[in-house]
Amino acid sequence: MVFLTGYSGAGKSTIAKALSEKLSSAVVIEGDTLRQQFKDDLAHGNRGAETNMDRLIAYSLLLFKTNQHVISAFVAPRADLREKVKEAMTREGCRYIEVFLNTPIEECEKRDPKELYRKMRRGEDIRLAGLNESYDEPQNPDLICNTAIEAVEDVVSRILEKIAESPFR
């Protein structure tokens, strides 16, 4: 499992899609897509994060057991929940690579692909990690990348190098 984490707009989905094109039998799971599969029944931000991580674990383990590589793209604002995913996956023999997209929040807000920052600034009830919700920056990720200064292809190459150090089963 390659677990991409960072602020909204950091490039998680873009990197995940580009990486999936380089790996055979890879499945991308995005936070918003997973929520939609369950009729978006969870609150955004820290409030719904725990249930969403439980769903990610269950779905990822099913994919892993059918020899699929999992690329997850989640804000995953809490360190304890990222650790829970890591422990569950590694307990089942899955290699877990955490990639922190440490892109400055100012850059993420400029990109604003889902217009979440704009909506929050207008006063809508939008929960954004790093602004009005907490975000525990990863303390020991396998890779740290900054998509404000690194091209998508360069980030993908760095992830592939990390995978090659100890290949997936």
Image (cartoon, rainbow, N blue to C red):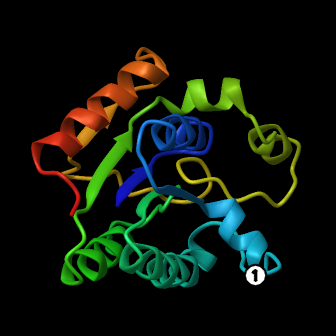
In the rendered image, the vertical position of residue 103 relative to residue 12, given as above or below:
above
Tell which of 123 and 55 is nearer to you.
55
Q: Amino acid at mark 1?
A: Phe
Asked which secondary structure carries label 1, the reply is loop
Residue carrying label 1? 38
Q: Nearer the viewer, residue 80 or 143?
A: 143
Q: Nearer the viewer, residue 131 or 3?
A: 3
Q: Is residue 73 visible?
A: no
User: Crowding near pointer 1: few (<14 within 10 Å), some, many (20+)?
Assistant: few
Q: Residue at x 57, y 41 (%)?
A: 17
Where's residue 96, x and y in %?
A: 26, 62
Q: Quadrant of the C terminus?
A: bottom left
Count of all numbered marks drawn on residues in the image: 1
Q: Quadrant of residue 163?
A: top left
Q: Is residue 78 visible?
A: yes
User: Left of 88 or right of it: where is 169?
Assistant: left
